[in-house]
Structures are given as structure tokens and as C-alpha cells.
Amino acid sequence: MRHLFTILGHEIRMLLVNPSTYVAAVLFLAIMGLIFTGLIEVYSEAAQETSPAYDFFRLFLGFAVIFIVPLITMKSVSEERRLGTLETLLTTPVSTAEVVLGKYGAVYFLYLLFWGSTGGLFYILHRFATDARLLDPGTLVGGYVYIAVSGLFYVAIGVFASALSRNQAVAAILAFVMLAVLIFGPKIALDVQLLQLEAFRPARAALDYAQVFQHLNDFSRGIIDTRHLFFYFTGTTLTLILTILGVEAKLLHH
Amino acid sequence: MPAVDPDTAPSTIEVEHLVKTYGGIAAVNDVSFTVRRGEIVGLLGPNGAGKSTTMRILTGFLPATSGIVRICGIPVASRTDEAKRHIGYMPENNPLPEDMRINEYLYYRGRLKEMPREKLRTRLDEMLELCDLKRIRHRIIGKLSKGMRQRVGIAEAILGEPEVIIMDEPTIGLDPHQILVVRDLIGGLRGRMSVIISSHILPEIEVTCDRVLIINGGRIVAQGTPAELRRSVVGRTHYELELAGDLTALPAVLAGVSAELAVQATAGPDEAGFHAVTLTTTSDQELGERLLQALTARTYRVRAISRAHPTLEDVFLAATKRSWDIVDAPSARRRDSRRRRPDKT
């Protein structure tokens, strides 16, 4: 694993000097700002039951994760495969696992950086809002912890999609679909009539357990449930192992 | 001028009965060879002969179906990481990241090759100097010309001072001047590192390499120094003469010079009465002088005489043709019959 930090450092550097990162960042903050402004307007008109931070994270999970994660992960492995530089990379004493983890780590770092920048919105609210109840630190901290933990899984899915195709557009669409299924799938599936049958109770329980919005809800209330952590950590590990195997399999059959 | 004694230098690459199949089709079929320290070996073959596959297996990038590959005595299959430390590799088409600067890229690669920072800095300077990249070291790789990119690839391959350097088509797509530069670079490695280069450009291999392996249809069909190959594969020397006189008496004269000498073709006479005659012999001896003496003694007037060296091109064509005939005879027949079928209908 001694090359992991060399690759990680290199990948972070390359992300930070790449113009497309900044385009994605501007896009991200613009959407974010719009959603936030909209939310503040709603809150200023009438009292709401939940804190704006919670609504903000909920909306954002829907939009930002599904659009931004594919945008920042699509390049990671597929670009190297397309250019053929994966071949030169893997003929140095570097393992596939180090390459995948290095790339994954770099994109995850960028993901955290993007989310970290949204702290500015809350800072502005804090400076100008007179009502202290609008800013519930518990919700804020819980929300960010959720973002960091769930991000592990989402970014892993993006990198996995990128390892499947040498075409970046295909990788992005794959990641988009997988993330959409993960985030909205269980919620929609639970509404299917067939699953209401008694025989499908275990399936319903499993789907219920995989509802990411429920996880967010718990986290933002300060409940850090080990079952949720388990869900994201195992998901991440499994996806990364599949990514490593996927990269190796593609090498064998190319 | 091989700087190494091929019998005493330790072998750095050993390949034994290497086989690689893709879905039942053999891309490399029972290939065995060794390369000694300091030797430059050329891997020659038509497109799809298995050159790149062989090289990829040598680097540990692809696993072999069967057979043994050892780099500096280390088996590549079981101790891949260790073997990779002894190899510098430049793949086909020389893939490079588009958005890095030359010195950044070389530094990053040096770190991946486990070079200590201090040593890497001095080595990097040396490499930039050697490959004539010093002036352009801050340029972005995506904006370089093909020749510059190729030099970056070569600098990268030799950066870590590996014992074995493997280059897949290092001179493809370069202009003659750049080919000369690259050739000098590779030639400069002779004696220090073992180099395998693949190519289908023959003069290239002939000038640079100490030894040539001709590979076709996944098999080695001929190997040796270019001179050995000429002898063993083509097996004939040609003499071209222009002479005037009675051609019917010529065979008798030739028999007096050497028993193996025979007339292969005659043409002419031209306006001045000279015939162009091609003689062929299986012997290696230089017969020019004796030939000249014998012919002038018999009142032939000789205007020109030359000994035609078979080029590596002739060797290559002869070797690959022979291998098609031998190795692929059944499938070649099938191919022929398939090709003929449209004619009949």
C-alpha cells in the first residue's frame, strides 16, 4: 500500500488543476444556492415543522448526489482506460487495488470539499438571521456526518460505473441510474401493491431498511444507528471490491 | 558492435514455452527465448503476430496461459511486483496523460517506481538532458508533437534505470530525423540494459539490434543476428553482372569458379551488347574476384559486378512465408479455398 499515497496525492492534484472540477463546483454551488434561497423564502413566510437544514439536506440528496457524483467520478478510471495509461500505470510495481483506492480517495476528497463549501450558506444565514431557531446545530452536524458517511457509498458507485466503460458518458449515465435506483428505488418499490402481500414482508423490511431518506432523517435528529453505518460501510467495501475485480477482469479480456 | 559477450553475460529475460490463448485462439504459441544483459533484441513480425501480447506478458500486465517468464531470474507470474521493479516499459502508441507537464509526469512515474526523492531529482535532470526535453520540460504533454511524446515515453521507460527495457514500436509514426534520434537513444543503452524492441520497420531493427527474433502466427520462426538470419533463412547469395560475350559458354566458366554457382536469370543484350546476368550460390565465400578473373580470361567483357546482400526484408519475407507454409498449411488451404469460392460463382 506504499504507492497509495503517491497515487492519492497525484489524483487530488490532477483534480484540483482540472478546469472541469471548477465547472462542476460552480454548477453545484449555483444549484445549491438556489435551493437554499427557495427554502429560506418558504421559512420566512410561515413557520415550518422541520429545521431548514434538514429540508436542505433532503432536497440536496436528491439533486446534488445524483447529478454531481457521476460528474466528478465519470473520469476516474474510464479516462485512463481510454488513453491506455492504465497499462503503463499497472506495469509499475503498483497493484490494481492501490490504483482504484487512490482514485476513489481523491474523488471522495473532492466530494467532501464540495459539500464543505455549502457550510458557507449556513454561515451567511447565521450572520443575517435573527431567529436562532433556524439554525439547529444538531441537525447541521448530523446532516454533515450523514453526507460524509453516505458519500463513501455514492462515490464508490460512481467509480465502479467509471471502471465499467471506457466511455465517460456511458460511465456517467450508469452511475446516474445506479444512484437513482439506490436513492429513490426503495421508496418507490414500497408503494408497489404486490409487496403489500404478507409473503413479501421480509422484502418489505429489507427495502424499508435501505431507505436513504430515513437514514438522513435519523442522522439529522442525532441518531447515529450502527445499522445505517453498517449499510454504508458494507456497501462501500463491496462496491470497491467489485471495482477492483472489474478493472482486473477488463484487463484480462481486452 | 555488441558490447557484451553473449556467452558469459547473465540472462535477464528467460522465456520458456510461453503460450497465450484468447478464447481458444493462440496469440502466442510456444515461444522460448533468452535475452542477455546489455543485449538489444528486436522482435519482428507482421501485424497480429503476437509481438505486443508477448511484451505484455513479459511486463506482467497480462497473465500467460502457460509457460514460464523470468525477469532477472524472478518468475513474473508468481512474483509480479518484484519483477516489475526490473522493467521499464513503453506500450504500443505510447499512451501518456494529456493534462500533465513533462517534468511532473516523469516525477510522478519515478515515485511510482519507488525512486527516493533526492535520487529522482538528479536522475530526472539527466533524463531530460539525455532525451533533449530540457527546454520543453514545462510543456503540457497533450500539446506535444509525436516525436516529443515518443521521447517522453522513452525517458519514462529508462528513468528508473531498470535492467530490462521493453518498447513496443518505439519509432512508429516518426519522421526520419526523429527516428535517428530515437535510434541513437536506444543504441546508447547497449551494454548497460537489456532492451527488447518490436517493430515491423526492418532497417530500423537491423541498425539497432544485436539479435532479431522473427515471430509470425504466435511462433518464433527465425532468430539470430541479422547476418546469421540471412544465411540460414535466405541461404543464397546473388551476384549481378553486366557482361558481353557468348552466354552459352557461361555455365562452364562458372563451374570452374565454384561448383555451386549457377545462372539464375539473364536479360538483354542492350544496345552496347551487354547482358544483365544474375548468378546465385549457396556458399558464403566471396567469389567476386575469382569470377572476374575467370570471365576476363575467357574474353568476356565485364562492365559491372556486384554482390547483392539479402536485406532483412528478404529474410523477413522468406521466414514469414515459410512459417505460413509449415505452421498454417491446413488453415492456409482453407483460407485459399474460401477466397476462391467467389470466383467460381
Image (cartoon, coloured by chain):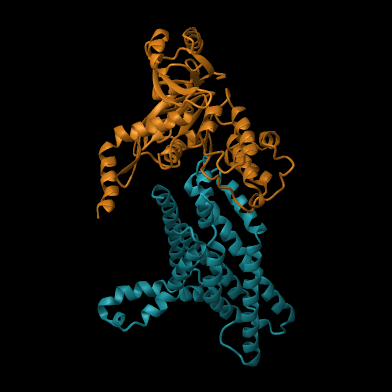
Residue sitting nearer the eye, B161 or A148 = B161
Q: Which image quarter: residue B34?
A: top left
Locate residue B312, reporting x and y percent.
48, 29
Q: Residue at x 53, y 65 (%)?
A: A151
Q: Nearer the viewer, residue A204 or B128?
A: B128
Q: Quadrant of residue B325?
A: top left
Quadrant where the C terminus of chain B sits is bottom left
Q: Position of residue A132 (x, y in %)?
A: 68, 82
Q: Residue at x 44, y 38 (%)?
A: B51
Residue A94 visible in the snapshot: yes
x, y percentage for residue B179? Answer: 61, 36
Judging depth in this view, the residue of B59 and A93 nearest the camera is: B59
Residue A223 locus on image (x, y percent):
51, 72
Query: With B124 as the anchor, is A165 left or right in this view?
Result: left
Say above or below: B122 vs A51.
above
Residue at position x 57%, y 19% in the image:
B1
Look at the image and give the colour of chain B: orange
Front one among B52 and B156: B52
The furthest residue to the bottom: A46
Identify the colour of chain A in the image.
Answer: cyan
Is residue A194 rendered to the left or right of residue A213? left
**B211 versus B113 height, above or below:** above
State how many labels appear: 0
Q: Is residue B190 above or below residue B178?
A: above
- Could you say which quadrant of the image residue A73 lies in? bottom right
Work out whether residue B30 can be spotted.
no
